[in-house]
Image (spheres, grey):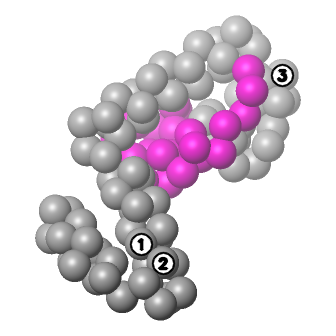
Amino acid sequence: MVKNLYISALLDVYGNFLGDKAKALTECYYNEDLSLSEIAENEGITRQGVRDQIKRAEAQLLELEEKCGYCKKFSLLKELANKYSLGETETIDEIISNINDL
């Protein structure tokens, strides 16, 4: 499995919607940079069991983002705020519109 920073961001936003075990395993993998084997050893389960739970958690996080889109909206707002700070003042209406959509 390739570690994806996007999943880590989704975990920050939607992590509380996961079960406690799935959240803990996924946080260990993405935020603490532990390997599947290290997590398995610490938790007393198989490496495959860890992988399966993380994959299910990833799917849930991606589904939540698809439905809610908060990470996408946050990224867009950051981009617009950066443009605004660089002097593109016409972006303010788009910023306000995106904030109102939240």
* Image quadrant assignment for residue 52: top right
In the picture shown, does residue 44 fall above or below 79? above
In the picture shown, does residue 67 fall above or below 9? above
Image coordinates of residue 10 in percent, x first then y, are 48, 46
Image coordinates of residue 102 in percent, x first then y, are 20, 63
Q: Residue at x 45, y 23 (%)?
A: 59
Q: Are marks 2 and 3 in contact (CB under 8 Å)?
A: no
Q: Nearer the viewer, mark 3 or mark 1?
A: 1
* Image quadrant assignment for residue 101: bottom left
Q: Quadrant of the N terminus?
A: top right
Instruction: Please report whichever mark, 3 or 1, sits nearer to the chain's N-terminal start.
Output: 3
Q: Which residue is mark 1?
A: 80
Q: Which residues are magenta?
A: 1-24
* Image quadrant assignment for residue 40: top right
Q: Are marks 1 and 2 in contact (CB under 8 Å)?
A: yes
In the picture shown, does residue 85 fall above or below 69? below
Image coordinates of residue 2 in percent, x first then y, are 75, 27
Return the mark for residue 37.
3
Q: Which residue is mark 2?
A: 83
Q: Residue at x 56, y 20 (%)?
A: 55
Q: Is residue 8 magenta?
A: yes
Q: Is residue 39 left or right of residue 26?
A: right
Residue 99 visible from this viewpoint: no
Say what amino acid the circle numbered 3 marks: Ser
Q: Is residue 78 left or right of residue 97?
A: right
